Image (cartoon, helix red, strand yellow):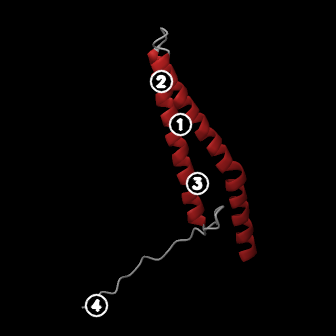
């Protein structure tokens, strides 16, 4: 039974490391690029007679996309922590007991 659990944990880790994490990073970079493009449109296209509203929309949706991807990244690590799967840095996500403090007088 332990072999099946370690097999499933290793497959979950492979999926998280080799598929989901790189995909999230690419989408985060895209969101940052949209944000920077929105800043460019907002400040520099206004001088050339462009539309500032389009730039502000790009800024807004770039930030929204970045926050969503950051939350997805955190959610993935919560799931890994729940199942006790090792991450790419060799850290084992396990539930730790609540610390107890011995208070002596």
**Element type where label 1 sits in the image:** helix
Q: Position of residue 77 (x, y in %)?
A: 57, 57
Q: Which mark is residue 57?
A: 2
Of labels 3 and 1, earlier in sequence is 1
Q: Are marks 3 and 1 in contact (CB under 8 Å)?
A: no
Q: Are marks 3 and 4 in contact (CB under 8 Å)?
A: no
Of labels 2 and 4, earlier in sequence is 2
Mark 3, residue position: 76
Q: Residues within 10 Å of mark 4 (few under 14, many from 20)?
A: few
Residue 31 position (above or below residue 82) = above
Mark 1, residue position: 65
Res 1 seen here: no
Q: Position of residue 17 (x, y in %)?
A: 69, 55
Tell which tag, 3 or 1, sits nearer the viewer: 1
Q: Are marks 2 and 4 in contact (CB under 8 Å)?
A: no
Q: Residues within 10 Å of mark 1 (few under 14, many from 20)?
A: some
Residue 79 position (above or below residue 54) = below
**Element type where label 4 sits in the image:** loop
Q: Is residue 102 left or right of residue 10?
A: left
- Whole-angstrom CA distance, mark 2 to mark 1, is 12 Å
**Element type where label 2 sits in the image:** helix
- Whole-angstrom CA distance, mark 2 to mark 4, is 60 Å
Looking at the rendered image, the quarter that the C terminus falls into is bottom left
- Whole-angstrom CA distance, mark 3 to mark 1, is 16 Å
Res 29 seen here: yes
Of labels 2 and 1, earlier in sequence is 2
Q: Are marks 3 and 2 in contact (CB under 8 Å)?
A: no
| Front-most of residues 13 and 38 | 38
């Amino acid at each position: 039974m332990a072999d099946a659990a370690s097999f499933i944990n290793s497959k979950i880790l492979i999926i998280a490391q080799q598929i989901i994490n790189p995909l999230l990073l690419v989408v985060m970079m895209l969101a940052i690029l949209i944000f920077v493009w929105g800043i460019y449109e907002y400040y520099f296209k206004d001088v050339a007679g462009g539309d500032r509203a389009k730039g502000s929309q790009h800024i807004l949706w770039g930030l929204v996309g970045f926050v969503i991807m950051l939350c997805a990244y955190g959610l993935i690590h919560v799931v890994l922590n729940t199942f006790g799967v090792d991450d790419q840095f060799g850290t084992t996500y396990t539930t730790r007991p609540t610390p107890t403090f011995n208070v002596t007088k």
